[in-house]
Image (cartoon, grey):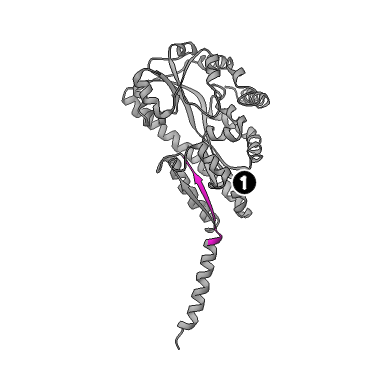
């Protein structure tokens, strides 16, 4: 007996179900400035697969890497308009939503990964609450790395910096007044123009993560690195509140857990690549200066002189005082 007539309705039903699942899938469009095929971009690709697995395909991330949907402020605008559902932000985008988060980027406030983790885990709920009041949801925080000073000549102590013209990368929060109050000559300069500025002598020092200093070949014109952490570099994946609500609630917890795993892995991969980059730069002329025991305290004392330009302006006095209290608490428990 011919079974084909019976099979046709079954196949049509299966097709309708499949189409229904596809149409009901929550497609989350994510913007990122991380270059295509970079560590950050690969992490997002892996996260896309993980979330699809967790949700059985009902949640799909569509990632736009390399800034193809604009810079961080462009992405934030598109999220507010609803044409983008989320984005990976650095401190620039984060502080455009939550000004108080800029306290984490304060020069010489936090000196180690352990200090950062102790402080951040206790402050994170406050930052997330502020972000949620603006209509957004943080699904991932990550410590990406650290800024270091690079200079044309040797620099160890704060007074050494006074003979340099320091390139300042403008951010959403103007920290240049703080640097000026500390007594330093600051030259506002975008990253894309840094190489030309170094070549022309307009600047002769900058602070950046070693990976960027290496990939941009900036270190060749500022071959002295002070191995003293200036400030942590943080990132976050933030969705619109509406996009988060479109994801079925039963997937929220496993998705948050999976993304925390990716964030930790990303930091470890970055640290390993940074080590390799520093070795390669040393082979090509980079000179690394280890800081004396008193260096960080001296830098922190000078940085404190510029705090009046930040406290109560870039971030609240309350947040700053809580950070100081947590750092003191950490040192009391664990020492330096």
**Count of labels in the image:** 1
In the rendering, at what x and y percent does residue 45 appear? 45, 48
Q: Quadrant of residue 280?
A: top left
Please say whether residue 30 is one of the residues in the magenta stretch: yes
Q: Quadrant of the N terminus?
A: bottom left
Q: Main secondary structure of the magenta part?
A: strand
The answer to whether residue 312 is above or below residue 161 is below
Instruction: Please state the horizontal and vertical placement of residue 159, each as a whole percent of the image.
Output: 48, 10
Q: Quadrant of the C terminus?
A: top right
Residue 126 location, quadrant: top right
Determine crowd level at label 1: few under 14, some 14-19, many 20+ residues with C-alpha closer than 10 A.
Answer: some
- Magenta highlight range: 23-32
Mark 1, residue position: 241
Residue at far left of view: 284
User: In the rendered view, would you say 308 is above or below 126?
Assistant: above
Left or right for 244, reference 269:
right
Instruction: Identify whether 252 is placed above or below 15.
Output: above
| Residue closer to the observer: 237 or 198 | 198
Depth check: 123 or 19 in front? 19
Residue located farthest toward the bottom when viewing the structure as drawn: 1
Asked whether 282 falls inside the magenta stretch, the response is no
Question: At which x and y percent is residue 109?
Answer: 57, 22
- At 42% across and 28% down in the image, what residue appears? 191
Residue sitting at x 47%, y 45%: 44
Q: Is residue 196 left or right of residue 97?
A: left
């Amino acid at each position: 007996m011919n079974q084909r007539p019976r099979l046709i309705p079954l196949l049509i039903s299966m097709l309708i179900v499949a189409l229904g699942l596809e149409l009901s899938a929550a497609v989350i469009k994510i913007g990122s400035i991380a270059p295509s095929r970079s560590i950050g971009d690969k992490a997002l690709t892996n996260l896309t697969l993980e979330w699809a697995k967790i949700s059985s395909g009902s949640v799909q991330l569509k990632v736009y890497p390399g800034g193809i949907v604009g810079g961080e402020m462009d992405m934030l605008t598109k999220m507010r308009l609803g044409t983008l559902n989320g984005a990976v932000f650095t401190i620039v985008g984060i502080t455009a939503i939550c000004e108080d988060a800029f306290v984490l980027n304060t020069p010489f406030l936090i000196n180690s990964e352990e200090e950062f983790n102790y402080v951040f885990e206790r402050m994170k709920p406050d930052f997330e609450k502020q972000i949620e009041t603006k209509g957004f949801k943080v699904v991932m925080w990550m410590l990406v790395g650290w800024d270091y000073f690079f200079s044309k000549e040797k620099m160890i102590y704060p007074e050494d910096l006074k003979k340099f013209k320091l390139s300042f990368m403008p951010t959403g929060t103007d920290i240049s007044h703080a640097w000026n109050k500390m007594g330093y000559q600051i030259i506002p300069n975008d990253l894309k123009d840094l190489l030309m500025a170094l070549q022309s002598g307009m600047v002769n020092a900058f602070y950046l993560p070693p990976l960027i200093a290496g990939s941009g070949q900036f270190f060749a014109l500022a071959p002295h690195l002070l191995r003293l952490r200036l400030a942590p570099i943080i990132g976050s994946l933030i969705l619109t509140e509406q996009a988060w609500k479109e994801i079925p609630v039963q997937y929220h917890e496993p998705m948050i857990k999976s993304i925390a795993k990716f964030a930790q892995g990303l930091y470890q991969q970055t640290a390993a690549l940074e080590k390799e980059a520093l070795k390669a730069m040393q082979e090509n002329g980079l000179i690394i200066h280890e800081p004396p025991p008193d260096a960080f305290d001296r830098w922190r004392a000078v940085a404190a002189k510029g705090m009046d330009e930040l406290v109560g302006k870039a971030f609240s006095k309350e947040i700053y005082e809580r950070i100081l209290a947590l750092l003191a608490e950490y040192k009391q428990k664990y020492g330096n």
